[in-house]
Amino acid sequence: MFLKGLSIRKKLIGSIIFTVLTTAILISAIAYHIMREALMERFNERAETAAQTIIATREVIKQKVKAYANLLSKRPDIIDAVAKKDETTLERILVSEFKTLHELDNTIRTLEATDDKGIVIMRGHNPKKKGDDKSKVFAVHNALLGEATSGVEVSPTTGEMAYDAVYPLKLGDKVVGTLKVGSYFREETANYLKSVAKVDVVIFSGNKVNVSTLKDGLDLTLSDEIMSKMKPKEAIHDTIMIKGQRYRISYIPIIDPEGKTRGAIAGLVSYQDLETSMSKLIKMQALITVGIFILLSLLGVLMIKPMANSLLLIVQTIDKISEGDLRVRVPQYKGKDEVGKLVQNMNRMLQSFNTIIRGIRTSANNLVSTVDLLRGAAEKTAKVAQNQSLQASRIAASAEEMTQTIADIAKNATSAEETASSAMNIAENGKKIMDDAANAVGRVNALSLQLSSMIEKLNKRAEEIGEIVGIIKNIADQTNLLALNASIEAARAGEHGRSFAVVADEVKKLAVRTIEATETISEKISTIQKETEETSKLMESASNEVSTATNYIKEVENSLNQIVEAASLVRDQIAQIASAISQQSSATEEIARNIEKSSTIAKELEKMSDEVAHEVNRLTKIAEELKNSTAGFKTKENEL
């Protein structure tokens, strides 16, 4: 109900704004989703990279420890001192070497040598502590058997873990002792891993934290479930909460030489940076969405405004046309779309209507003038017929008197001669009157033919109007078809095409109103054509009646000629009247019959003239109705 009260312009602008807003939100949502996925991918890549970096760094530490142990195990002075169990020499060498190694790599925490029984002879990192038995330690045991061994060892007393590389000290083929270089998983190692991987590091010994670069990470535990899933050189990723802060944690297993998982190194990546980036992304997307909405809305309004204004002007123009005002014109529309074509066709239609209506008015006025002339001629013909009838009545009376006095003709020849002369004069006057009547009827006939021609032209004009109305109806049908196609396309577009369906519905209503207007005009034109056809038939009937009257007048004229001849004969033979009384009586009777016939013809002519006058009056009414039917139209020129 709300949309029905809005104008086309408001509906179009509203549709543009709704479409633009929906599009902007959709684009922003897609962009946000893509960028969010990209940030998440980068975050996960960072966590994975950190885990791989920790693995690689741990391997580097392992290789360095093995390299140091291998290098020192081949030094003859160390082998000789161990074989001789020369603690003084060993202390000097090992303390010096440990100091050098520790300065080069602060992750190196232990350097010790045992004899061939596995008894510690000297520790470079702690010279005072010695004499303890390491023969049961897996790596030392293997080294005493001549096999270099490296791996994680866990202190049975402190629970600390260290990566040890134990190499046999051989004097020839005999193992005289072992040399161990070790790197404890302490704070230095954790900080070193943190500096390389750029993430916080937590080292688990068993299920508990051994060392952590994150202060809040000391209370973490390593679950048995995760430990059971660990595989060498593979990281397990998980998300944990530490005091309300989310972290991405990557567990790297710590496996001893026997293949047992003894703990893990975990890299922690905070979600805080990701959440900050996401917040900035949301704000940026909101600003971009608002900017896109404002820009596209302005562009849409600027594009739709001329079209909406033109449609509004077309509706206003059609309203004025429905009131009969053909002087209006739709302002030119610069676009080359359907609206531009509609404006051009509308103006051409109005121009054609102006020309046709002016032609109809001119024809109607000419028809009225011609009918006025025809009415005057018909009235004149009626008067002449009336006079002729009166004269015929008088002649009949005179003939009757002549019949009654025929018996006295012989006695009064002179009086008969005068009477015959008088009769001849009357007959000549009647002949003259009949000539005038014949001429008048001829003019009536000519005017009837002219009127028939004008009516035929009027009928052609009406047919031309019908053709133009047909063209307009075709244009309206095409417009209706375009609106239907637009509705179909809008329906295919679904929710986003609803606004365009509203526009297509308004265009369709406009086309329907145009079709109704053309049908109304067609009905009026059909009425005019029917009336002109009836008028043409009436004029043809009147022309036939006039032709009949002409024939009657000619017969009367012939009769009057006979009367003149008879009267002349009466005058010439008046001297013989007495002797030819019988013949004169017969001639007199013949004259009486002819006069009676002339009287009858005159009466019929008078009646026919009345009918012609009646038909002319009817034709006058038709012409006035035709003129009035075009009076309601206002054209650019002055009204006729």
Image (cartoon, rainbow, N blue to C red):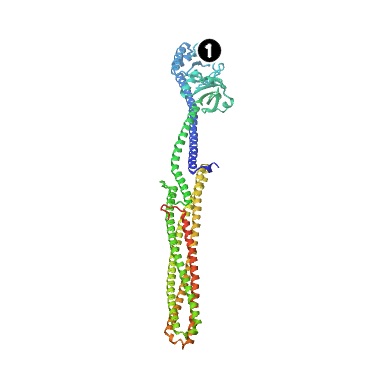
Q: Quick one: 326 or 586, which is closer to the camera?
A: 586
Count the marks: 1
Q: Nearer the viewer, residue 270 or 224?
A: 270
Write down the residue under mark 1. 131
Residue 500 screen position, x and y as percent: 50, 44
Between 572 and 214, the one lying in front of the other is: 572
The percent position of residue 585, horizontal first and vertical second, equals 49, 84
User: Could you say which is closer to the camera, residue 349 or residue 99?
Assistant: 349
| Rendered-image quadrant of the C terminus | bottom left
Q: Is residue 68 above or below residue 391?
A: above
| Rendering quarter of residue 465 | bottom left
Q: Quadrant of the N terminus?
A: top right
List x then y, in percent, for residue 375: 46, 65
Residue 593 in sight from this viewpoint? no
The reply to whether residue 426 is visible in this rendering is yes
Q: Is residue 459 above or below residue 439?
A: above
Q: Circle 1: is it few (<14), some (14-19), or many (20+) Cα within 10 Å?
A: some
Q: Is residue 287 above or below residue 317?
A: above
Q: Farthest residue toward the right?
A: 224
SS at circle 1: loop
Which image quarter: residue 416?
A: bottom left
Q: Percent x, y for residue 634?
A: 44, 52
The amino acid sitting under disc 1 is Gly
